[in-house]
Amino acid sequence: MSRPPVRRAQRAHHSSTPPPQPSFSIPPSDQPPFEHQPRSDPPTYVSSRAAYPTFLSAQDTARLHLSCAGRGLLDACRWDTVVRVVASDPEVRSHVLKSLALNTVSLLSVYFFDWLVLPLARGQQRWFHRNLGWFYQVLWLLPVVGASFYLNSSWCTLIAKRTFTLQHGARAAAQPPGTYSGVLNALATSAYRAVMIGTSVVLSVALEHVPFVGPPLGFTFLCWVDAYYCFEFIWIARGLSLSRRVRHLEERWAYYFAFGLPSAALCMWGSSLANAALFALLFPSYIIMAMHARPAPRDPYNPAAAADDGGVRYPSPLFPIRIPVFAPVLFLNDAVVRVLSVGTGGRASASASAAYTYGGGSGDGGGHRRMFSDGAESIEEGTALSEVGDRGGAGRLGGPASRVRVRGPQSVVSAAGSSRAGRKFD
């Protein structure tokens, strides 16, 4: 019996139907082909040498130090700036003229004693003639010189404040301490500074008595001491502590040596009292020059930053970044303060010494290691470059660090997702 025709027609229909097509369709020729998922790139490996810090060559480092010294010498000879500031402001002119008149009298009194009184009293038989020089010193010379030094110090402070105000504005200077503890700290700092002046003079005189190398070492040390006291007023106006002032000079030793060279060379030909009187005569002028100076390099740990592409290139290891110029002075200073503060157990000197050591101390004078609290600062411009990183590796060569520019009295430095109050520079 044959099957119904309907079934036969259905089988014929299914047999003529083409097989089912896949779910995707081939795009037309005018459309771009399907984009395939890109393959992941293989990991790249960096050689260990690329993680090392890069250094300038010895020739480039020497050239940079010579250029910094030349800039310091040029800044120390800008008498046109002194004339312009004195002529433009009556307050500065008044203090400068008073200091000039008093120190001229003091200097002439010293030379009168050295060239006239002392030769006449030498070899005399009478008691009065034999002691004429002693009477002249006690009754005239020492009171005049002492008064001139005291008044000159106060006038130089006023000159520095006025010059700083003319250059940066009245609100740029650090405000004096208003609390009781702040006043005590200011008094302790002034006393420590006075002892530091005395120890610097004693050390310079002691160096001159060392055979052969003593006179050159004493003169070199005197250049740095002169430069320090010329720039101390602007550092105090910026609110820098003693340890940071010392560090700022020691990390720019070439510039400050050249800046103090002219004043030290002018004040080395007479007696000690005459040299001191001559320096007091020139001191107001060098304060004005220091106010308008720009110490170099801006960052001693990356001195070629201006000519670089942004990378950090440290100076050559053959040249020290920091020379501990004032390490012997601070050591003697702490010893004197420790003797004077027997009742307090020497805590003041210990704190001052600890502040100096924490800021980089004399132990790394010739090294290239930056401490955690260090920062490359441009003090005169009111800016700072702070090296911020993790506590374990911040400041190491090649370690993570970020450059932060600090501006204004309430600036906040932010790095690595954290923020902290910035220092007041302007």
Image: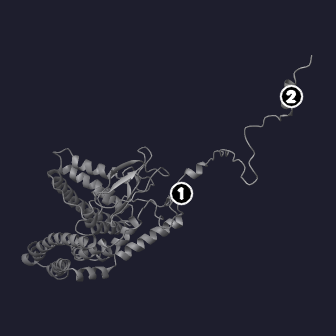
Image x and y of residue 425, in percent = 30, 61
Image x and y of residue 251, in percent = 39, 61
The answer to whether residue 362 is above or below residue 149 is: above
Mark sitting on residue 9: 2
Between 167 and 350, the one nearer to me in the picture: 167
Image x and y of residue 173, in percent = 24, 64
In terms of sequence position, does the residue under pointer 2 or pointer 1 come before the other? Answer: 2
Q: How many marks?
A: 2
Residue 110 visible, this angle: no
> Which quarter of the rendering shows the C terminus?
bottom left
Secondary structure state at the residue bearing disc 2: helix
Neighbourhood count class around disc 1 (C-alpha, 10 Å): few under 14, some 14–19, many 20 upward: some
Mark 2 vs mark 1: give the one in front.
2
**Image point (35%, 62%), residue name:** 383
Q: How is the image coloured?
A: one colour
Neighbourhood count class around disc 2 (C-alpha, 10 Å): few under 14, some 14–19, many 20 upward: few
Between 264 and 355, the one nearer to me in the picture: 355
**Image point (27%, 82%), residue name:** 83
Query: On the image, which quarter does residue 262 sit in?
Result: bottom left
Secondary structure state at the residue bearing disc 1: strand
Name the residue type under label 2.
Ala
Image x and y of residue 212, in percent = 38, 67
Between 79 and 310, the one nearer to me in the picture: 310
Residue 43 visible, this angle: yes
- In the picture, measured across the screen, residue 270 lies left or right of residue 70, that is left
Residue furthest top in the image: 1
The answer to whether residue 296 is above or below residue 4 is: below
Query: On the image, which quarter does residue 57 sit in?
Result: bottom right
Q: Which residue is mark 1?
A: 54
Name the residue type under label 1.
Thr
